[in-house]
Image (cartoon, rainbow, N blue to C red):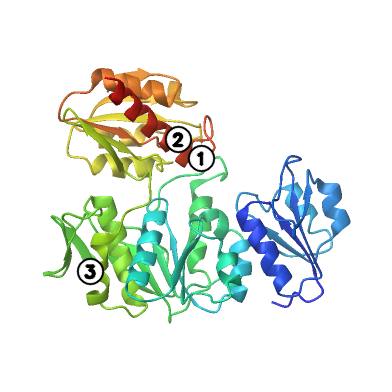
Amino acid sequence: MNLNGKKVAVLGCGRSGIAAAHLAAAHGAARVCVFDSDPEAVCHDATVELIAGAGEKEAREFAPELVVISPGIEADKPWALAFTCAGAPIIGEVELAYRYFGGRIIAITGTNGKTTTTALIEHILTQAGRTAKACGNYGYPFCEVALAEEPPEFAVLEVSSFQLETIVSFRPDVAVWLNFAPDHMDRYAKVSDYRQAKLRIFENMTEEQISIVRVGEKLPPIKPKVVEFSAVDGSGLLRYEGTCIKQIDTTVTDLAGTALAQTHNAENTMAAILACRAVGLKDSEIVPTLGSFVPPHHRCEFVVEEHGVLWLNDSKSTNLHSTEAAIRAQHRPIILLIGGKDKGLDYTPLLPTMQGRVKLCVVFGQIAEQLERTFGGQYDTVRVETVPQAVEAALLRRQPGDVVLFSPGTSSFDQFSSYAQRGTCFREAVLTHIHQQ
């Protein structure tokens, strides 16, 4: 991409937007300006030109020759389209970084498990002596990695459907497809639209590249070679049996005693092993690294065990599929804390998974009334407003041998700025109440 002398508009002044502005400037753009529709938007980097509170008028007046859009902004809406008045193409931050990154790319997508798998692949590569950076939707913005004085050998790139909407030529060396389930129905008109956005990860790949895919995903025909794994049906090149990952009848590794032994993390581990094999690592380099891996916070994270009751923080669960996986991974009676923002999802598909596992539902947040109607007919259900109140309700009803599973099943934006803030609130409420007893 030749940016010499061109005028570039970057939409969104978050970290990825600022990184995109720096990368464009470093490659010769004559003027790079960051635009944000929020009049209170602030950029703490004095080298970046920011226009806060920008409207369609400012967009047309600037008339850029290239538009780089942040993933949280929809490219087909009037505000973004106003920047294309002079015929400028719209690309995403991931696409811009791809044009300038000279290393190899392992890209990970899926409804759930992306972040843990991304972090694990980075961990394996670095522990095995390679240079790698987790980036994209987790870790660093991809543009920051592409701009580094000494870029890593590998970009381990978590890519969301939002980021894949705006690719053009992006092509990873290895693509990991973990799973698919309905999500983000506040952004997409149909589930098929969400699925098509995620499928774009394979769009530019050829027979020379490799895709790592969970068994049963029913993908359309794709060009890269497909290597499968499964933790549930015993098929695929790698499968999970007991606590062991196996290839045919040979044990590749035993996850007992690691942080990866639950079924959902076993699937993430199999995907990571296959991705690292695909870029040339041997099992003798991969397996010794697994025991030292600590999953990112807020993913079925241990909080405390008190009086025989286990408390788990799964605040990263922002959709039904993630909560379903968390429920299936438990082997104790569950007190399920679930709720948050209304994303237009139907929660009735959870009911069969809950059967025989969940003893009490504590529902909270904007969607609490809907959840009370959905679960109340079949399960003992308590409705509250806030996360601390949900913790109090669980404390009153817990019994030795239970697990209190905080797995909200939707996004946090009704009461919190992020799932991390929500998870921290849960953890603090649990520890505060327990210490007061």
Residue 418, labelled with which disc?
Answer: 1
Across and down, in percent, residue 250 comes to 12, 71
- Indicate left or right for 165 with 412 as reference: right
Does the image show residue 194?
A: yes
Image quadrant in which you'd find residue 125 = bottom left
Crowdedness of circle 1 by 10 Å Cα count: few (<14), some, many (20+)?
some
Foreground: disc 3 or disc 1: 3
Tell me what residue is drawn at x 75 percent, y 52 percent.
35
- Count of numbered marks: 3
Which residue position holds label 3? 288
Does the image show residue 215?
A: no
Across and down, in percent, residue 422 comes to 45, 35
Instruction: Locate the N terminus and report the quarter of the image it occupies.
Output: bottom right
* Residue that lies at the very extreme toward the left in this rendered image: 249
Q: Are marks 1 and 2 in contact (CB under 8 Å)?
A: yes
Image quadrant in which you'd find residue 429 = top left
Residue 422, labelled with which disc?
Answer: 2
- Amino acid at the residue labelled 3: Pro
